[in-house]
Amino acid sequence: MRALVVDDSRAIRRIIGNIIKEIGYEVTEAGNGFEALAQLDALGCPDLILVDWNMPEMNGLEFIKAARRDVRYKQVPIMMVTTETEMDRMAQAFIAGVNEYLMKPFDKSQLLEKLQLLGIETGA
Amino acid sequence: MVSNEEVMQITEHVLGTMLELVTVADSEEVLLSGRSEAFTGCVHISGEWQGAVIVQGSPELGRLIAERFLQLSPDEVSEVDVIDSAAELTNMIGGNIKGLVPGPSFLSIPSVTIGSDFDFQLPGTRTFTNVVANCEGQPLRIKLCESKS
């Protein structure tokens, strides 16, 4: 299983990546939406995508819209992990095609709980 | 609009949840300006509400948050690690404060400076929240500046 973690923060990529690796995923990283689209083109469809909202060059919302327009990525589970806490932002993300939404700050148990809601076996 | 207590709650929540660090309000103003490797993070909020959130901490706190964020041992932490970690701390505190100001508002990408030999100004703003805290014995200050226009 492979997960794509998209965040401009190396710190957040490290924290999320380590948790995802613990439950058996191989992790690929990208620092913004453009890099993430390039990773999709290069490596094919992952089993899971976790994406931040506010990033330089191409933000997470734009990335999700672009990915969902491509038939190859219509079904991949996408979770947004972001500091955007307002309800209207959350609604925008779901309309764009995310399957789950996690607000920063979060701890390991909150991330695992959201993954379980996506039907992912976490062992927790 | 946003009280010192709300800023303190957000700061405690971010550092406690994400990094398992204990933060308490401090009554004393801590001078960070003389600390050669203190960090200063800034994130701007634009839209219906305009202003900025500034997060400043001691060199020791910068290294501690880098250790926790990046899961490094103390001797592995570099200045780049401190900058990356301080940027994310500023982003999370700023993002959660943005949820309390009138919207729709938008958060900038954070910027971070390490050092003390500089004068940091946000022209056209006034400081209306200034929280002084203590995180694991290290000084931390969070300022919220609002555009005067």
Image (cartoon, rainbow, N blue to C red):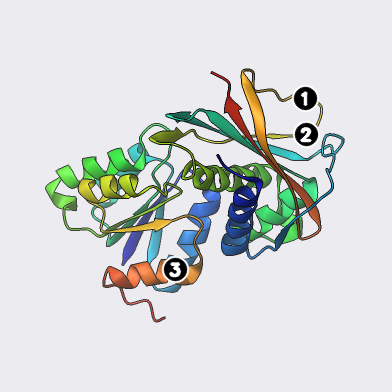
Residue type, label 3: Gln
Chain to which the residue tagged by mark 2 belongs:
B
Q: How far apart in space, not on screen, are marks 2 and 3 (Cα)?
A: 35 Å
Q: Residue furthest left?
A: A71
The answer to the question of whether label 2 and label 3 lie on touching residues, with beta carbons closer than 8 A, is no
Q: Residue furthest bottom?
A: A123
Q: Can the viewer see residue A124 in this picture?
A: yes
Horizontal relation, residue B71 to residue B120: left or right:
left
Residue type, label 2: Gly
Name the residue carrying label 3: A110
Chain to which the residue tagged by mark 1 belongs:
B
Q: How far apart in space, not on screen, are marks 1 and 3 (Cα)?
A: 40 Å
Horizontal relation, residue B149 to residue A50: left or right:
right
Q: Position of residue A44 (x, y in %)?
A: 24, 52
Q: Quadrant of the C terminus of chain A?
A: bottom left
Name the residue carrying label 2: B115
Q: How far apart in space, not on screen, are marks 1 and 2 (Cα)?
A: 8 Å
Q: Quadrant of the N terminus of chain A?
A: bottom left
Name the residue carrying label 1: B118
As drawn, B143 above or below B119: below
The front one of B59 and B46 is B46
Q: Residue furthest right?
A: B34
Q: Can the viewer see residue A21 in this picture?
A: no
